[in-house]
Image (spheres, rainbow, N blue to C red):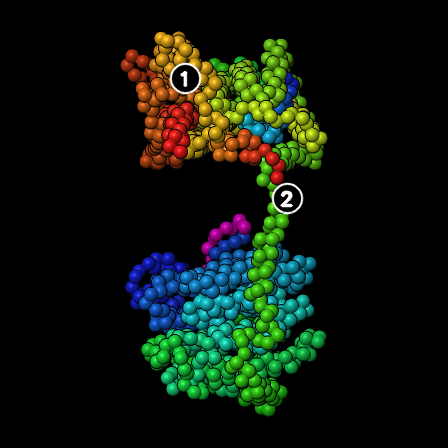
Amino acid sequence: MALPFVGSILIALLLRTNSRLLPASVAGFIAATVAIATAALYPFVRNGGVVRFEAEWLPQLGVNLTLRMDGFAWMFAMLVAIIGLMVVLYARYYMSEDDPVPRFFSFLLAFMGSMLGIVVSGNVILLAVFWELTSLSSFLLISYWHQNPAARDGARMALTVTATGGFCLLVGLLILGNIVGSYDLDAILAAGDQIKADPLYLTSLVLILLGAFTKSAQFPFHFWLPNAMAAPTPVSAYLHSATMVKAGVFLLVRLSPALSGTYEWFILVGLAGITTLVLGAYFAMFQQDLKGLLAYSTISHLGLITTLLSLGSPVATVAAIFHMMNHATFKASLFMAAGIIDHETGTRDMRRLSGLLRYLPITGRLAMIASAAMAGVPLLNGFLSKEMFFAEAVETHADSWLDTALPYLAVIASAFSVAYSLRFIHTVFFGPPPVDLPNPKPHEPPHWMRFPIEFLVVACLVVGIVPNFTIGPFLEVAAFSVLGESTPEYSLSIWHGFNIPLMMSLLALSMGIAIYVVFRDYFSRCDDGPPWFRHLRGQRIFERVLVTLSWRWARSLEGRLGTRNLQPQLRWVTFIGFMAALLPLYLSGFQPRMIAPSGVDAPFLGMWIVGGCLAIGTAYLAKYHRLAALVMLGGVGLIVCTTFVWLSAPDLAVTQLLVEIVTTVLILLGLRWLPKRANTLKDELTFRARFRRFRDFLLASICGVGMAFIAYAVMTMRVPDAIANFLLENAYTQGGGRNVVNVILVDFRGFDTLGEITVLGIVALTVYALLRRFRPASDSMAPPEQQRAQSVFDEQQPDRDVGDTVRDYLLVPSVIMQWLFPVVITLAIYIFIRGHDLPGGGFSAGLTMSIAFLLQYLAGGTRWAEERIRILPLHWMGSGLLVAAATGIGSWLLGYPFLTSHSRYLDLPLIGKVPAASAMLFDLGVFLLVVGSTVLILVALAHQSVRINRIRAIDESREEPS
Amino acid sequence: MELVLAIAIGIMTSCGVWLILRPRTYQVIIGLSLLSYAVNLFIFGVGGLKSDEPPLLVDGVAIETLTDPVPQALVLTAIVIGFATTALFLVVLLASRGLTGSDHVDGRSDRR
């Protein structure tokens, strides 16, 4: 059962051909298959049976892929499939050569799949998913002619309205599911009383109704439907009259056993339905666009169905289902007829069309029958359901003014609908031959384009004349599946004798004719849109609301709450961070479970007294004495490093030391490009500045105190035995290394490390990219003071050339550093190899290696180093990442999960026993990448001093001619 | 020991927070470095403080006496990532200074 619908989506995704016929035939084939498959299920649902298919999707959330088909779903699925087939056939001829036809059919099939999904969903969450899918595919189909702005606007509006409704629906269904305790449709339908008694019933009802009303274009959300008429006509016929807009009322019918019957239901649904019914019919009379008329008429008919559902009586529900089917048949055929008229004449403006019957005799007659069905003329299907509607309207269901007014409103709306049907036919097909049509010679379309209309019109006739032999049994099955035991006795016959409904019908007919005769001239002259309401456009209001919401409110919120300054943001972040730490402590209390703190070591205390002073000094000096602050920061770093050694973390100490070196050099390189102290700025403090400083100081102090407190508390608590012992026990047996920290990094948490080195590589590339276009501020362009002094000195000495002093600068240290190059590389390799068993490893080795390169830059200067060593950091990085990933993938080849490691010791001649774990290869990748990215960052920064000379030279040469 | 380290962490946090709230980019980068020291030491401290028992498996030493290696592995990662962010921030700082001509965190000194 799921097969055709899954298949239709699948093929929709695969369709990318250029042929015109192929997509149409594939789509037709799919639609036909769906229709046949659905039809084949009829024996299973005939006796009130339910076909179910269930697959687990998210069982822990109670969301399963449940499909269920009962009589009602069967009927709707048939409707979707058969009209889909007709529309595909029609569209085959309707779409022009220039349109991307495969896309059209692919969207259409996607829609068909999602619509079928709604119909057969057995789980409300699944239903909401398909619901959104129909909104999406409707958006894509409306905007099919995306070069047309009206299509884009209409599509956007339709999506905004229906998707907002869909969101409300989802929330409503979630509430419903929570009330019942299950998202399964059967469970929800069975729990009607429980739902209605729940305090959240009203909330859920309103939300679900919002979803249904937006989808079914009920007042006040009706305005999107006329704008959606910018879609190709097959889409209007299929989505916006026959199926998608029916999804809303479908849902109301589906959920009516669970939700309906209360006073709230009657008022909410009834009010919306009646308003829509009357207003839609009234608006439709004044439309000049053929499709606009049909759109408003669709709205009005949907209102009729909604009104029927609001009554909550079984017969009304039957009538609603019946009218859904009838409306789908005659409205789809009318849309197709309108499409043919548009296709043949080139316009849909009723002021320009007239007397088309002589050119389109067959289409014209078909359209006449269909509009007669729309108007509710006897012997046609529209008449039958309208009769039932009248009969229900007369009966009193809930005693209120709404109920009393209903019969009168029904007659008025019905009269309007007679009037607009008459107007449609009379204007377009009768009267003098049309003048100045864009397409002067209209003629009958190919027969197969007309065939869908013929088919549907015949359906109207047959159902209208012999209802009991055609639709009767199906309708009964559908009604039974919704209403169950309370399925009423009803009669589908045409003649019930002279009773009130018949009188109402006749009254409506004659009133409608009278309206048309009286106002005929006005209709043909008036502007688009009904009098009084012409300026009150739903579309306009919608756009206003959108602008207000997404622009004005957003702006004012940003202006009030937002800031573009970093400091307030950071202040808030810090404050919230502090509160986030404080709140749990405050709420759940603090229970000290102290273990005795270890005794204080005097040297440790002394070291940290120095460290604290250095930290404070850094904070104090960072504003004006950058170098001093950097030196002090380095001091703090060293003390941190010593602390790591002291507290048995040699790995950390090594890494910290190396990172400290590299960071310091980096910042030193950067210092050159920062501005000098501006002497013009007076250091006078205003009151506000004093206040700011005081506030920041306060914030910093409480953060510090809080952090110290938490740190002390944490450190004096017993460590729960979590994973530490596991790692310690298994590091050697499974990871093959004695240095547990390293084993964790390259083995147990190897995947994290892979991610981490990737981040490092990305950072390096970003730094490189940022610096490629780096242009320093104008005041840092000049050569630094020291260089200038040296140049002046060189010029004064007769035996020296300019630049000699720079070259001789720090000569002895630089020679030593150059000699150290191989030594440092050896050290790096040593650190790398011992890493698995002793402190060291890829990270520290990589950093050491990059320091080796760095030393050369420091010793010889950037230009000297770049002339002699060609480092290709990108190659290092790339190979590092590849090696690391390949090591991980290698374990796949041997049938283990990603990054499983293997270890053994190798006996190498001369060297002896060498640990050789596959994790070591991974570590090699880490090493290569760390070298590559660190060097890339440092070199990119150091290279600026070479680049700056070039920029300076270019600037000077540019200035000279001017 | 614990008390000393806790107070040290507190002092570094205070200085770091103070500095990242300052208006000059250089102050912020130094402040971030100080903060990262504090945070690293804090995470490291979670595992408890033990002197002279590094998590290196040596035959004949009971593993229960060794220091918890997990915080160490975490901090090792944190150090490297901290280095990367510092480098990135430094370059952003320089580029911003080059583009705007100001080393204020907002790229301009006047308040708007």
Tell me the kind of residue under disc 2: Leu
Instruction: Residue under label 2, please give it.
Output: A561
Tell me the kind of residue under disc 1: Leu
Q: Quadrant of the C terminus of chain A?
A: top left
Residue lying at 60% horizontally and 50% vertically, measured from the top left: A554
The local crowd at label 1, few if under 14, some if 14 to 19, many if 20 or more residues have their Cα within 10 Å, is some
Magenta stretch, overall SS: strand
Q: Position of residue A511 (x, y in %)?
A: 59, 87
Would residue A696 appear left or right of A71 to someone viewing this image? right
Q: Position of residue A884 (x, y in %)?
A: 37, 30
Asked whether B17 or A739 is in front, the reply is B17
Indicate the quadrant where residue A573 lies. Answer: top right
Q: Secondary structure at mark 1?
A: helix
Instruction: Residue under label 1, please give it.
Output: A858
Residue lying at 43% horizontally and 12% vertically, measured from the top left: A793
Q: Evaluate whether residue A373 shows in this view.
A: no
Q: State the residue lying farthest toward the left.
A: A909
Residue lying at 61% horizontally and 29% vertically, measured from the top left: B22
Asked whether A813 or A31 is in front, the reply is A813
* Span colored in magenta: A51-61
Look at the image and say whether residue A91 sits in the magenta stretch. Answer: no
Q: Is residue A534 above or below residue A550?
A: below
The Cα atoms of the two marked residues, 2 and 1, are separated by 48 Å
